[in-house]
Structure formats: structure tokens, C-alpha cells
Amino acid sequence: MNKTINQKAWYFVIPVFVLVAFNAAIPLMTVVNYSFQETFGNNVFAWEGTRWFKQILLSERFHASLGRQFAFTFIILLIQIPLGIAIALTMPKKGWGVPVCLILMSMPLLIPWNVVGAMWNIFALPDIGFLGHTLNSVGFDYNFTQQPGDAWFTTILMDVWHWTSLVVLLSYAGLNSIQPAYYQAAEIDGASRWATFRYIELPKMKKVLTLAILLRFMDSFMIYTEPFVLTGGGPGNTTAFLSIDLVKMALGQFDLGPAAAMSLIYFFIVLLVCWIFYNLMMKNEAKS
Amino acid sequence: MFTKLYAATWGDVGKAKEKGFFDFDLFSWMAWTWQTAAFFIFIALCIIVMLIWEKKVPGGSPRKGILGLDTTRGDRLFVSLLGSAFIHLAWLGLVGSLLWIASIICVAYFIVVFKYV
């Protein structure tokens, strides 16, 4: 019997198509249009060609915020991935400890981002905040609103607190999917704890870890709300990451053209990194 | 939208605009110019060509290219377009003028990607 070919189901995709058009395609097209023009509002635009792209590509300010962004992302990945794996390894595999640990771990993930920022802002205030006051009373000269180093320290600590759980949960899922037979074989061979980790657990977690790195990279690369509430990009511009700098340019200065050009460059970087990670994941998939 | 076939210049700033057929308020904020419209028409044409190509030769001709990646036609288009964006940006940042030379490099890049990647 021949199957009848019926492609009418495609019509059901139309609502999604319309939605994506309105929340992604049309705004993106507008950004492209703005990036080639100058405006003072009132829907009057003047053609500027590639001037804004040139300006952004050569601007010290963009280089600085891009550099800060990469530094931030690199540092939090360097902390969160090993820390997440370490916590996942120490979490219980059965018994009442499992739900307790899982719930404790998911708590930070459930808190809205601006609340995380506000919490850490108050927590770290040098005069009344628990963290800030304690650090100052034991002799550290800590003030995240005035010292760039302290601002970075607090921002990174906040991100580690907020997002390490994601790495933990993913690694834990990866660890739980390893068959006990592997561990038994390792035990028979007299493998050390490190060898078990290096040759059994780590390879088995490779897939989820790639995913964790991708998610953490993207989220931290586009981070806005938490540092905006915590430091507002300050002191000065020292914690103005890409998105904070972008909003400053677009809404603070109303430089829509340069901001549009900057967001497109930002977008291309994100796309490139996504593509690289996607291919890495697909390679892993094909191998296993 | 296309009431004037050239984009506004500094001389037009502050002057009252002639209202064209497409210049309703829902639309004018998008600030279309023929250059950017041409760009998006080019992207749309690329996608249409890909659709026709897929109809003619189904399957997307998957292969393992020089980068060691499993790619289909769609992947190659994506790599070409994204790479072209970076080639243009690099040209703007490093050279700064005569952007059409970068566009010619991109055409060569497209051909290389579709042949070997």
C-alpha cells in the first residue's frame, strides 16, 4: 500500500513562523537598517554607510568592553566547570541525601536575575552588608562600589554562586548514567581514584560538559541584569561588559547607529562561538 | 519605504518628508534603505535557491569536508554567510576603504566553502 503524502501539517507551523518574524526577524532587520544610518529620533534617518562599523571596530571603548567580556567569561568558566564537577562527584548517589542536594543545588537557579543582583548588592555593601562588613572587620579594605578589583571579585563570586549549580546538575546527570560495571572493572584493575575519574567518569561526562560549557559561555557572554544591578558597570567602566556598554550607548547616549553596529558585531561573535560549540557537540555525538 | 530610491542625506534632516504609500507609522520606524533591503533580498534569494536546489537534488549532499566536519548544503551556506560577515568586518577594521574588494574575496570564499568544506 502506498502512503499518501500529506504535507498539510506544515500549516500548523505558521503561528510560530509569524511569532518568530515579529520577535526576531523584524527587530533584527531594523537593527541592520539602523546600523547604516544616523538618527536624532522622530523617524528621520540619514545614510552613513559603513561609518559606524568602522568606528566601533577601531574604538578603544569597544575593545575594552570586549576584552572585559572575554576575561569575565574565561574566569567564570575556569572556576565553575571544575567546581561543578567536584561538587557533583561528592554528591550522594542514593538515599535521602539525593533530593536534599538536588533541591539545594537548584535553588540559586530559580531566583530571578535582578533579584540575584539586588541580593548580592546588599550582601556585599561595605557598611551594612554581611559579606562587605565581615571582610572589612577582619581587616580587608573591601568596597565593591569604589575599587575595580573588588567589583570584579564580587561579580565573579555572584556568578559562581548563581550558575555553578547548573554545571553540578548536568555533571551529576552525566555521572549517574555511568553503568556500575565500569566502576567494578576499575576496582578489579586496582585503578586509583584519579584514574577512575580520568578514564571513566570524565569521558562519560564529555557530552554534558560540552553542553554545560556552551550554556555557561553563552549566558555569561550575554550577561546583563546581574552586573547591572550589582555594579551598574562601575566603578567607572571597569565592569561594563559588552551588553552593559551596548545599552549605555543605545539608551544612555541615544547613539542608535553605533549601538546597532556594535550589536551586530556582538551577534556575529555569538553566532561564531555557537557554531563552533555546536560542531564540537555533533562530533562527540558521532563518535559515541 | 521606497518613496526615494536613494537614502536620505544630511541635507534632508529636519525637512518635512513626503509621505509615500509604504510610509505608514507601523512601518517607517524600521528605517529601510534600498541598500539594506537589497541585502535582505539577497539572503531571501539564497534561501529560495537552496530550496530549489534541495528539490532538484534532495538530501543536502552531506559530506566530510576539509575541516573534518559533516556538512550539508545548509551548513555550507551558513559558514559562507557568517564568514563573509567576518571578512567584511576584518576589511573594515584593517583596511577601511574599498569595501567591494572584500566582497570579491567573499565570492571566492563562497566558492571555496561550497566546493571543499
Image (cartoon, grey):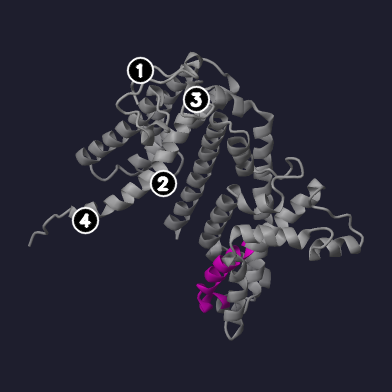
The answer to whether residue B79 is visible is no
Circle 1 chain: B
Residue A173 counted in the magenta span: yes
Residue position for label 4: A9
Report whether mark 4 lies on the same chain as mark 2.
yes
Q: Where residue A126 sits in the image (x, y, percent)?
A: 83, 58
Q: Residue drawn at (33%, 23%), measured in percent from left and top?
A: B2
Mark in front: 4 vs 2: 2
- Kindly identify which chain the residue marked by label 2 belongs to: A
Label 4 – label 2 distance at C-alpha: 23 Å
Q: Callout 2: helix, strand or loop?
A: helix
Q: Quadrant of the C terminus of chain A?
A: bottom left
Q: Magenta stretch mostly in which secondary structure?
A: helix
Q: Are marks 1 and 3 on the same chain?
A: no
Going from N to C along the chain, the mark reached first, 4 or 2, is 4
Q: Position of residue A20 (x, y in %)?
A: 37, 47
Disc 1 element: loop
Q: CA distance from mark 4 to mark 3?
A: 42 Å
SS label for mark 4: helix
**Pointer 2 residue:** A23
**On the rendered image, what quadrant is the N terminus of chain A found in?**
bottom left
Name which of mark 2 and mark 3 comes first in the sequence. Answer: 2
Q: Residue at x 43, y 33 (%)?
A: B29
Numbered badge on residue A145: none
Tell me the SS state at disc 3: strand
Residue A124 horizontal/vertical position (percent): 77, 59
Q: Which residue is mark 1?
A: B5
Residue A282 vertical position relative to residue A109 in the rendered view, above or below: above
User: What residue sits right under mark 3 in the picture?
Assistant: A37
Rounded to the nearest whole Å, what is the CA distance between mark 1 and mark 3? 15 Å
